[in-house]
Amino acid sequence: MKGYIQVYTGNGKGKTTAAIGLAVRAVGAGKKVFFAQFVKGMIYSEVEVIQNLSSDITIKQYGLDCFIYNAPTKADIDAARNGFNEVSEIILSGKYDVIVLDEANIAIYYKLFGIEELIDLLKRKPEQTEIIVTGRYAPDELIEFADLVSEIKEIKHYYTKGIQARIGIEY
Amino acid sequence: MKGYIQVYTGNGKGKTTAAIGLAVRAVGAGKKVFFAQFVKGMIYSEVEVIQNLSSDITIKQYGLDCFIYNAPTKADIDAARNGFNEVSEIILSGKYDVIVLDEANIAIYYKLFGIEELIDLLKRKPEQTEIIVTGRYAPDELIEFADLVSEIKEIKHYYTKGIQARIGIEY
């Protein structure tokens, strides 16, 4: 079965959650899944559940913390660079059927790694591997290159009412 | 903790998958989750995984099959009506922290039940209960009433290239 490139972008809630859902579904069908989280280094509730779900799923975080409201530090850049190198090997190994690059768009937006190197990597992926890329600000080059792109638009969000992120719902 | 109403709508891929991700995250945070699927009656890969995930999550399907390209039959209507009644009791019982009404928008679009009765039910939900409603064609009344609305837009989809739905990826 041929694998494709899927992108979930936009400013609305649901990008990472959709990727988690895809990972769960893939594992349910007996596929091997690697879930790489860039930028984020916080303990999300889902990380623990996903890791305990099945030995067919591996989740690894390549971020230190949520720097989104600040500028990335050298440590953030190193973590993302290390992540990109590790994930490149994982993709090229052909050992996983589905690989999620969660928040890779954000990593590119903050220049933690480049869009050219991501596309170069995607071009070299094994035929059968499905790749899911998430994060707002998907670069035009990625949208052009991808097979499927869903843009999640915020129509309405309770953050604007001053409601804080809640454990088990937002993280 | 106060619970809100979240809606995932639009014509792009990722609505049900986002709801699955939310359910997994909530279970990871120790919440009790009820996942009701309207309209769909097919065996999705995720159903089995979700059901095996934890005893804190219950998934139930109230659809017979995917009638989306045909008109709903009497049996479809009965299944949805029965589902709506059962889910109403579940919501009002206060036993679940997060309740997903997957494809409820489609059920309303096909007049399997009414938007007025859904909103009436949502108004009576226990304070702490979080409700997630998915499906394209979310009615305006629901968008107005909800606290969070994400519209998932199809920017690009490989279906248009003639690629069929694949097990472990689309279902």
Image (cartoon, coloured by chain):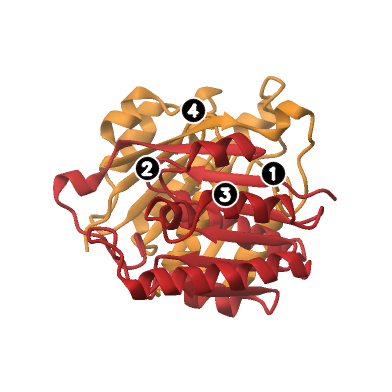
Chain colours: A orange, B red
Question: CB under 8 Å between callouts 4 and 3?
Answer: no
* Cα separation between marks 3 and 2: 26 Å
In the foreground, B96 or B29: B96
**Amino acid on which the number 1 mark rests in the picture:** Gly
Would you say residue B40 is visible in this rendering?
Answer: yes
Question: Chain under label 3?
Answer: B
Give the SS element for disc 1.
loop
Question: Chain under label 2?
Answer: B
The residue wearing badge 1 is A41
The residue wearing badge 3 is B116
* Cα separation between marks 4 and 1: 17 Å
In the image, residue A73 sits, relative to residue B18, either above or below, namely above
Name the residue furthest top: A71
Q: Residue at x 41, y 54 (%)?
A: B106
* Cα separation between marks 1 and 3: 43 Å
Give the SS element for disc 3.
helix
**Residue B162, horizontal then vertical, whole percent:** 14, 51
Q: Residue at x 71, y 26 (%)?
A: A160
The residue wearing badge 2 is B12
**Amino acid on which the number 3 mark rests in the picture:** Glu
